[in-house]
Structure formats: structure tokens, C-alpha cells
Image (cartoon, grey):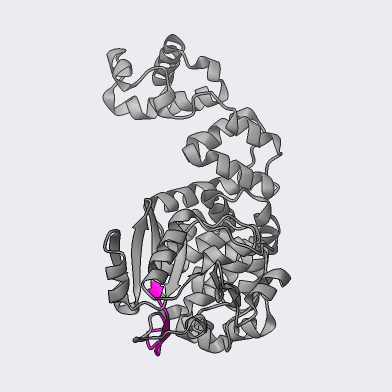
Amino acid sequence: MADRIVLPTHILNLMTLLEEAGEEVYLVGGSLRDALLGIPPHDFDLATSALPEHTVRIFADYRVIETGLKHGTLTVIAEGEPVEITTFRIDGSYHDGRHPDGVTFTDKITEDLSRRDFTVNAMAYHPRKGLCDPFGGREDLERGILRAVREPSLRFSEDALRIMRAFRFSAQLGFSIEPATLLGIAETREGLARIAAERIASEFLRLLCSPGVEQALRGMIEYGVLPYVTGDYRPSDAILSVIGKSRPEEAERLGLFFAEAEPEEAAKFAHALRLSNKQIAALRAVCRSAGLSVHTEADARRLIADCGVYAPFGVRVSVLLGHSPVEAIGWVEDNRAPCTLADLALGGRELISAGIEPRRVGRTLEYLLKEVLKEPEQNEREALLSLALAYNNRT
């Protein structure tokens, strides 16, 4: 665990400007947590005693975005990087289960840290003053434990999305959630019904693509959280046991998670989560291919024809679920044979020129693709034309 945190020059410069103006300032949030874990931080957040209006004046020479000024937050662009700077604050009541009704600004960093979700996120750092850690976050980092700050039920009642964040952090960091925090989750999980589907989906997708996904999903099932995400769909133990072995790519893990649902049923859940059309198309494709058996190169070409760019995700899911041999992955990923109508060596206009009725062109092209999937070497203009004419003479 790192003892001294090396901060980028632009962050140190921002901190210096605040201190020269007579204010306190600390590094806070996920960047501090990651730095202590030895993970290179990316997005830096600062907390300061400066009131928002004073912060704006201090950074008059910078581009400033007034992100959430009434809650004390603004974004300063320093060397092209956005840095959130928030005034020390105490949150009021959370009647909507998401936002505080109001905030009270304070000059004490410890009061600001007390409103945060988990102890590992409730620390502050200053290059000269060192680490401010009133709730034992560093010890929890060392022990690999996720623990709510003070009273868990209160933390989750304030914002039920913190329940999803708990399981997401557990999956990302490989941390266990301590018992009192799990009890608080169970007591307040109904609050997730008031959270926007997009916010839940964002956390869930990040969880799915994390190393500890199996542990997190099993916890969500055990403590009654999963129904607030995927309704009455629950993956079997077989899926839970292999999902962590899949590649941490959204299309693959989302498709594997829903592999036991019918593609249209999976799409229904995806719509409920407000996923994008592209995400839903990927989900449908991977679900379709998850139960297929790919035992020959011809099978692989048929899968590619059906799933297009999502075929590599689908075949890996099929292999993980035991429907296809591991060689199938290579057959799909190394395939250079034609797999779609666009890959055929002739098109509809050529068929019409050869005397085939326009109303029969679509059906003929589908027939030619099936033949080429079986024997890719037939994908030559003269061979396809001969096949097309013979097909139309028979039907």
C-alpha cells in the first residue's frame, strides 16, 4: 500500500492556488483510493474549504464549468484534464432517495468525509499533511473490506444506488462486503425501485465487466437485490460459475448473463434497463448463439452469418457453456470465408440479367449463401450463376 502519493503537476498547481488564497484543499474520492492501492489514478477530485463563488474567482484564469454550483461542485479544466472541485459540505435530507434536499457548507474536512458512502472512499490526502482517515478506510483497503460509513441503513436510504455501487466496488476490487453493510443493503433494497433504470444499468454493466463478477452476482441474489435489476430473470449456477472466465467485454458478459433467456425475453429486460439499440442488438445476437453447437467450420460460418460482428462473443459463450469445443473459437475468429449476402461474388442485378425473375432474387440469394456456407470455394461468379439457374429450374 503506497505511503506517499505522487500527484500530477496540474493537480499540485490547483492545490497551491487554493492554499495561496487561504483555503484548505485535499485530494479525495476514487483517485485517492486507487492511488493507495497502487492503481494509477485517472480522474482527480479535490475538496476544499473555499465557497463555490470564491473557487470561481481563484480559477478566473482557467476554464471553469459550473457543474453543480448549488451543491458546491465545479469543474476546472487544467492542462486539458477536467478536475472536480467541491466545497466541504454536509448533506441535508434525501427525500427522493437520490439527491440531498440541500447542503450546508462547512470548513471541516472530517464533516465532509462523514457524508460519503464507504470508508475506502471517505479519506482525504494532502502532500504535506498526509492522510486524513477518520473512518478507518486505509485499514479496510488493506483487509479488502467494503464498509459503509457510520450507519449502513442511513447511507443506503440517502441514495439507494449506493447498493449497486457496493456490489460494483466488490466486483472491481475483489473486496468482501462486511456483514453490517450487507444487512443495511437487505433492509433498504426496496429503495432501488425509485432509482432511474439508466443509473442502475450503468453500475450493473461495470459490475459485469469486473474481475469479481461471480462473487458480486451471488451476493446480489442472496440479499434480494438482483430482481431490482433484471426482474424475474436469474441466471443458473452454471452461468454464475463460468461468467468470471469469460472475457471482460460488455457484449460477451451481457450475453452470457442472459444466455438462458429467449433472445426476445433478454431484449425485454435490456429495454427495461434503457440499454442502447446497439447493446440490445449485441445481446440478441449473443443469446441466439449461446445455445448453438459449433462442431465444424461450416457451423462456424453459419454462426457468423447469423450473428455478424458479434459471432466471436457468441462462440466463446457457447464454448464456456459446453455446447461447442474450444476449437470453435478459432474457426470463427480465423474465418475468411463469405458469411453474408454482401460477401457473395454476384448480386441481384446479375441474377436479373441472367433471366431470373425479380420476385425470386431474394430467395435465390439466400439459397446461394447456404451453399457457400457449406462449400466456400463455390463463391465464384460462374459457379454461383450455375447454381442459381439450376435452383430456379427446379423450383
Which of 49 and 16 lies nearest the eye of the viewer? Answer: 16
- Examine the structure image and report whether residue 250 is included in the region drawn in magenta: no
Residue lying farthest to the top in this orientation:
382
Which of 220 and 371 lies nearest the eye of the viewer? Answer: 220
Which quadrant of the rendered structure holds the C terminus?
top left
Q: Is residue 16 left or right of residue 175?
A: left
Residue drawn at x 65%, y 79% as measured from the top left: 136
Which of 168 and 151 lies nearest the eye of the viewer? Answer: 151
Q: What stretch is highlighted in magenta?
A: 86-98
Q: Does residue 326 appear in this view? A: yes
- Examine the structure image and report whether residue 97 is included in the region drawn in magenta: yes
Q: Is residue 56 left or right of residue 383?
A: left
Q: In this view, does 265 lie to the left or right of 51?
A: right
Residue drawn at x 45%, y 66% as measured from the top left: 45
Kindly report the secondary structure that dominates the magenta region of the rendered protein.
Answer: loop
Q: Quadrant of residue 259?
A: bottom right
Which quadrant of the rendered structure holds the N terminus?
bottom right
Q: In this view, does 93 lie above or below 214?
A: below
- Where is residue 104 drawn, in percent x and y? 37, 87
Q: In which quarter of the image is residue 293?
A: top right
Q: How many labels does the image show?
A: 0
Which of 33 and 206 lies nearest the eye of the viewer? Answer: 33
Q: In which quarter of the image is residue 59?
A: bottom left
Q: Does residue 274 appear in this view? A: no
Q: In this view, does 132 lie above or below 61?
A: below
- Where is residue 197 drawn, in percent x and y? 41, 69
Q: Is residue 189 left or right of residue 318?
A: left
- Where is residue 112 drawn, in percent x and y? 47, 82
- Where is residue 361 drawn, in percent x and y? 33, 25
Q: In this view, does 352 lie above or below 173?
A: above
Q: Is residue 330 above or below residue 318?
A: above
